[in-house]
Image: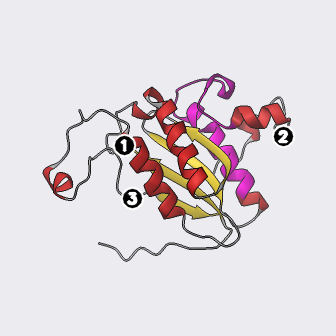
Amino acid sequence: MPDYKRIWLPGGTYFFTVNLADRSSDLLIRHAELLRHAVRRTREAHRFEIVAWAVLPDHMHAIWTLPPDDHDYALRWRAIKAIFSRGLPRDESTPTQRVARGERGIWQRRYWEHTIRDDRDLENHINYVHFNPVKHGHVTKIEDWPFSSFHRYRQRGTLPANWANPDDLDLS
């Protein structure tokens, strides 16, 4: 196994990609209310600010800012995954080695994390999060995707009316 090093920055802002083990599943949107419950409970126990979030059928992207004295985003992801998993019926197939470790096999074990470096990096990642349902072909207009913080941004007036024009976005 590679010696993967994560950056732990108290009060940092991070971009995440978290995947289901079964990438053909629609579990996250089929059980969206359970996922919301898991996030609410986790935020009650371990504060963090949600900067942006988009939930797709088999994965999600999120941007969080942690409190100034805290860097433990892994604790929060473990809690969200555990609360969500415990709320699901036990009908998935689980590989034997995962069962032996007490895992259900719902989630991929690792997730992608990126420490946001500056305002431009943050803007690019917020755009990436919000545009992702269009990128994956779930909708043609982002405003049609219900599982996204995009709607909160539009309500606050922080995104322009033509925001979802792909020609105007830097999604690299």
Image height of 154 relative to 15, above or below: above
User: Is disc 1 in contact with disc 3, using a CB cutoff of under 8 Å?
Assistant: no
Q: Main secondary structure of the magenta part?
A: helix
Q: CA distance from mark 2 to mark 3?
A: 32 Å
Q: Point out which mark residue 158 bears.
A: 2
Chain part drawn in magenta = 122-149
Q: The disc labelled 1 sits on which kind of residue?
A: Ser
Residue that carries the numbered disc 3 in the rendered image: 110
The mark nearer the N terminus, 2 or 3, is 3
The answer to whether residue 120 is above or below residue 70 is above
Residue nearest the observer in this picture, 104 or 125: 104
How busy is the neighbourhood of tag 2: few (under 14 within 10 Å), some, or many (20 plus)?
few
Is 118 a magenta residue?
no
Magenta segment includes 130: yes
- Expressed as whole percent of the image width and height from the top left, the position of residue 162 reads 81, 30
N-terminal of the pair, mark 2 or mark 1, is 1
Q: Secondary structure at mark 3?
A: loop
Disc 1 element: helix
Please report whichever mark, 1 or 3, sits nearer to the chain's N-terminal start: 1
Vertical position of residue 62 compared to residue 151: above or below: below
Viewer-proximal residue, 92 or 23?
Answer: 92
Measured along the vertical axis of the image, is residue 104 above or below residue 166? below
Quadrant hosting residue 71:
bottom right
Tag 3: residue type? Answer: Arg
Residue drawn where x is 67% and y is 73% of the image: 69
